[in-house]
Amino acid sequence: MLTTTRLRSLAHRFGLPILALFVVVAAVAAAHVRARAFTNPGGPGIVLQISPTTVKGGNTVTGTLSLRATEPGPIGGVKILLHSSNTAVATVPSSVYLPVSNTGFTKVTFPVTTHKVTSTQRVAISANNSILNTTILTVTP
């Protein structure tokens, strides 16, 4: 069970506002009751990666979403919603389309634009399509 004390501890550990972490936890809970269309139940589903994971503010890094599908997806691909927990530090496109190929594996990249900061900041970057994936980006002065 996730208590308020545990939520505060996690927020402090990752250097995130408690509200940002609460939103992530709520989205994860909601994702468990949604269908997992176009993903392999025995596999990783959608995987979110940011490279590099630490960057000097003012630079752009690359986000990558990959998907292993069990069947071809809809024409045009699967819409993946993207979110930054602190847009004053790092911004992402609101969404990307992940094409689903007949081979069962596909990926797409997107820019993560960072802004100059006066102290080191951690930002949660999230991708959601029934399954929520979050990774932490560290932005330095």
Image (cartoon, helix red, strand yellow):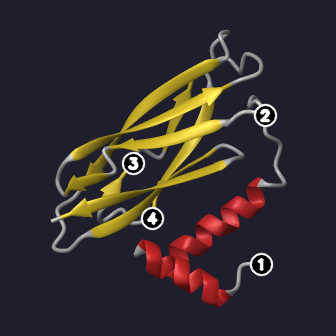
Is residue 96 toward the left or the right of residue 4 in the image?
Answer: left
Displayed quadrant of residue 44:
top right
The structure residue drawn at horizontal position 76% and vertical position 30%, both measured from the top left corner, is: 40
Residue that sits furthest to the bottom in the current view = 5
Residue wearing tag 1: 1
Counting from the top left corner in percent of width and height, residue 103 is at: 65, 10
Q: Amino acid at mark 4?
A: Ser
The structure residue drawn at horizontal position 62% and vertical position 90%, both measured from the top left corner, is: 5
Counting from the top left corner in percent of width and height, residue 125 is at: 46, 54
Q: CA distance from mark 1 to mark 3?
A: 31 Å
Counting from the top left corner in percent of width and height, residue 55 is at: 23, 53
Residue wearing tag 4: 85
Is residue 11 toward the left or the right of residue 113 in the image?
Answer: right
Q: CA distance from mark 2 to mark 3?
A: 29 Å
- Labelled pair 4, 3 in contact (Cβ < 8 Å): no
Q: Residues within 10 Å of mark 2 (few under 14, many from 20)?
A: few
Could you tell me which secondary element the residue under label 1 belongs to?
loop
Q: Which mark is residue 42?
A: 2
Is residue 9 toward the left or the right of residue 68 in the image?
Answer: left
Displayed quadrant of residue 42:
top right
Residue wearing tag 3: 92
Answer with mark 4 or mark 3, whichever residue precedes in sequence: 4
Q: Nearer the viewer, residue 99 or 9?
A: 9
Q: Amino acid at mark 1?
A: Met
The structure residue drawn at horizontal position 60% and vertical position 35%, both measured from the top left corner, is: 79
The relative height of residue 1 versus residue 72 in the rendered view (above or below) is below
Counting from the top left corner in percent of width and height, residue 139 is at: 26, 61
Q: CA distance from mark 2 to mark 1?
A: 25 Å
